[in-house]
Image (tube, rainbow, N blue to C red):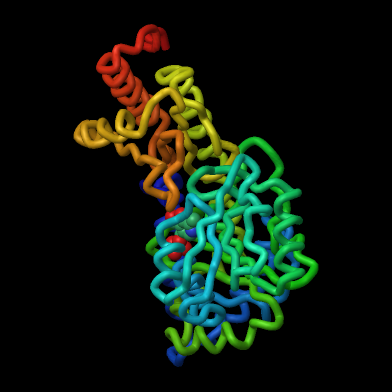
Amino acid sequence: MQYASSLINPGLGASWARRLARAATETAFGYGVDQGLPFLREQICRYVAKSRGIQTTPDRVIVVSGTRQALALCSRVLVDEGETIAIEDPQYFGTRQQFAAYGARVLPMPTDNEGLICRALPTAAPRLILVTPAHQFPSGTVMSLQRRLQLLNYAGARFCWIVEDDYDGGLHHDSQPLSPMRALDRNDRVIHVGTLSRVMFGSLRFGYMIVPEALRDDFVHAKNLADFSFSAIDQLALAHFMDDGGFERHIRFVHKELRVRHRAMIEGLRCYAGERVKIAGAHSGMHLVGWMPDYDHDEVETPLASAADCGLGLYSIARFYLVRPSTPGLVLGYAALSVTQIRDALQLFGECLNTIDARARRLGSNIDDC
Ligand SMILES: Cc1ncc(COP(=O)(O)O)c(C=O)c1O
């Protein structure tokens, strides 16, 4: 799956190259500041205040190399070998692997259509709980306000930490986003992690953490041990991009275009898959989930390879779970495809479904008239 917004905005490469060239002439050649360039941290504060409603100050921001490094620093600072951490099930492989590599005992927590089920959390609190409230990865559920508050109460009462992975930067299509956990947090228990891998491009390797006061020094120290700091030229280029309005224009462009692709995706699925696929998690982000309750896992997974031979990338959601879900489903990314490509891909997908149905002798499910 390709998610980067550079695939949506073809002008991004040239804009970025201009900022990089300027930054290269303005950057001092010594080592950077561990925590990140102060000018960039100020820009990040403005960005999260405007786009996510998070009020913070530059001393609480740490510039990192993407979410991966943020998770590695959380493991290093917070988790001792054998300690328990809780993650949502399903989840991003990177999360699970990162904590497991540091010796954490990873506890999968069930999720439903309101996000992580808080009443399933253990009485003895884990060291930290990692969530993706804005757009659960990969199911796409938006965590309800009630669940967010329950989770904050749980963490506040038991002194455990919450890591909020805000990986798709609040790209909402049809409703106002709920406040991030960091903005609702009254006890300073939330570590907010943002990345530009989706809203710009993954090879930039840029991310940021907004950390609780009590953890700030430990995180800055851990960052220093890891790599001194993120590339100073990229930091300055990004600070200029944010300061001169280019970044905001890029996000606006991406958002507008993404909505068009999102609409094409929903219409195409309705047209070619009809009732056979139940759409979920489509309110924001760059992917949605198609649940297929009338099929079994083998029926859905066996044709994935032949679909790939036809150039169609279909990904089973089951592989993102530690505890296999009862219903099969597919994670369907659309950000990297034009409207025509989306329509062609979904037509092919409809043909795949027809083949599965014909094999299983399901009657009346073919859709001819789109
Ligand atoms: C849930 C989740 N978090 C974070 C990321 C991005 O990670 P990074 O910032 O290291 O590129 C992804 C990328 O697919 C993701 O799916």
Q: Is 203 left, or right, of 156 in this rendering? A: left
The quarter of the picture where residue 188 lies is bottom right
Identify the residue at the far right of this view.
Answer: 186
Across and down, in percent, residue 347 comes to: 34, 21
Q: Quadrant of the C terminus?
A: top left
Which residue is located at x 56 percent, y 79 percent?
A: 78
Identify the residue at the far bottom of this view.
Answer: 30
When the figure is inspected, residue 289 is found, relative to residue 117, above or below; the finding is: above
Can residue 104 be seen at all in this image of the molecule? yes
Can residue 200 be seen at all in this image of the molecule? no
Q: Is 329 left, or right, of 44 in this rendering? A: left
Across and down, in percent, residue 5 comes to: 45, 50
Across and down, in percent, residue 221 comes to: 54, 89
Between 110 and 134, the one lying in front of the other is 110
Which residue is located at x 70 percent, y 46 percent?
A: 144
Across and down, in percent, residue 315 comes to: 35, 41
The quarter of the picture where residue 140 lies is top right
Between 119 and 47, the one lying in front of the other is 119
Which residue is located at x 47 percent, y 69 percent?
A: 105
Which residue is located at x 37 percent, y 26 percent?
A: 346
Between 230 and 66, the one lying in front of the other is 66
